[in-house]
Amino acid sequence: MLHEEELSILRDISQSVAFADDRQGKMGQLIADGYVMKDGDLFELTAKGVTAVEEHAAALGASDVEQASADRLI
């Protein structure tokens, strides 16, 4: 299971956002786990990385819907 910091890195990569050097240590593990690949100086998400980002976004969307429903009940 990915931690929030790792998911944040995957989202940044998917949006072509540069990230700080202090997060570079996590990149090695994400590459080893098959979420990210290195292409020259750039990092790209693998299909597994894309799926992880999409599933996380869907889970957040479901949480938002559930929260909105709960708010209306109050």
Image (spheres, rainbow, N blue to C red):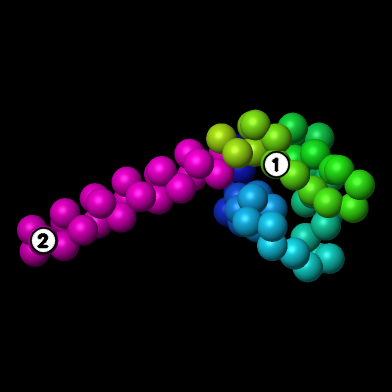
The image shows a total of numbered marks equal to: 2
Tag 2: amino acid:
Arg
Distance of label 1 from label 2 (alpha carbons): 38 Å
For image coordinates 81% across by 35% down, the residue present is 32
Q: Confirm whether the magenta stretch covers residue 67.
A: yes
In the rendered view, tell whether residue 7 sits above or below residue 37. Answer: below
Q: Which residue is mark 2?
A: 72
Please state the horizontal and vertical placement of residue 42, each as a whole percent of the image.
83, 51
User: Can the viewer see residue 33?
Assistant: yes
User: Can the viewer see residue 9?
Assistant: no
Q: Confirm whether the magenta stretch covers residue 45.
A: no
- Label 1 sits on a secondary structure element that is strand
Please state the horizontal and vertical placement of residue 2, each as a whole percent of the image.
61, 43
Q: Residues within 10 Å of mark 2 (few under 14, many from 20)?
A: few
Please state the horizontal and vertical placement of residue 58, each as a whole percent of the image.
41, 43
For image coordinates 16% across by 54% down, the residue present is 69
For image coordinates 64% across by 32% down, the residue present is 48
Left or right relative to 16: residue 32: right
The magenta-colored residue range is 52-74
Q: Which residue is mark 1?
A: 45
